[in-house]
Image (cartoon, rainbow, N blue to C red):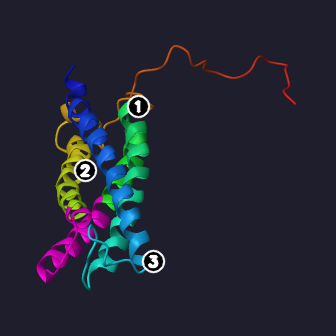
Amino acid sequence: MAQTVGRNIAAPLLFLNLVMYFIVLGFAGWCLNRFINGQTNHPSFGGNGATMFFLTFTILAAVLGIVSKFAGGNHIRAWRNDSLGAAATSALIAWAITALAFGFACKQINIGGHRGWRLRVLEAFIIILTFTQLIYVLMLHAGMFSSKYGPGYRDSDYAVRERGVEDPGLKGGTAAPGTRVV
């Protein structure tokens, strides 16, 4: 029970972030399509000078976030040290790109001008995702501080034997005399 405290908190965050990243991907794809087609005067789009940078980093953050959730799902399922590295690294990279998109969202809000409801929704989702992804990354790394929150980087609960304790399944000694293995 104590080993699953981190898993019970990280799993809902993983699912929430996955759903939110899919929503962001849909909105960012629609907005980027309108922006490339030159339809910025659409009533639900608008935009300003920061829009192209914001949309580029938003769609990149969404794709990386979705991919990192696949590695995170594998780690939640296994909940071992060997899957922690891939999940933590991909989640940290996804958070970094989401934080960049967060900065462009703040810049876009600061510049002002007409922004349609889809861009405002996209800005809100990126702002929320920045903080929920940070909490998810911290939950993955919580095992460093206490093993009750999950597998840590220094835990050796498997694949390492204690000193002086022999495994009864291992056979010691040499091969039978007179036999040769080719």
- Separation of disc 3 and disc 2 at Cα? 37 Å
Would you say 80 lies left or right of 149 here? Answer: right
Q: Which residues are magenta?
A: 95-120
- Residue 60: horizontal and vertical position, in percent? 39, 65
The label nearer to you, 3 versus 2, is 3
Q: Earlier in the sequence, mark 3 or mark 2?
A: 3
Please tell me which residue is depicted at 42% across the width and 58% down the height of the picture. Answer: 63
Residue that label 2 marks: 137
Seen in the picture, residue 158 relative to 32 is either above or below; the reply is above
Q: Quadrant of the N terminus?
A: top left
Residue drawn at x 43%, y 70% is 33
Residue 50 locus on image (x, y percent): 26, 81
In the image, residue 148 sits, relative to residue 31, either above or below, namely above
Ranked by sequence position, the earlier of labels 1 and 3 is 3
Which amino acid, mark 1? Ala
Overall secondary structure of the magenta section: helix
How packed mark 3 is, by other alpha carbons closer than 10 Å (few <14, some 14-19, many 20 or more), is: few
Q: Is residue 136 above or below residue 78?
A: below
Quarter occupied by residue 149: top left
Q: Based on the picture, tell me whether residue 45 belongs to the magenta stretch.
A: no
Residue denoted by label 1? 78
Q: Are marks 1 and 3 in contact (CB under 8 Å)?
A: no
For label 3, the residue is: 37
Q: Nearer the viewer, residue 73 or 87?
A: 73
Q: Position of residue 37 (x, y in %)?
A: 45, 77
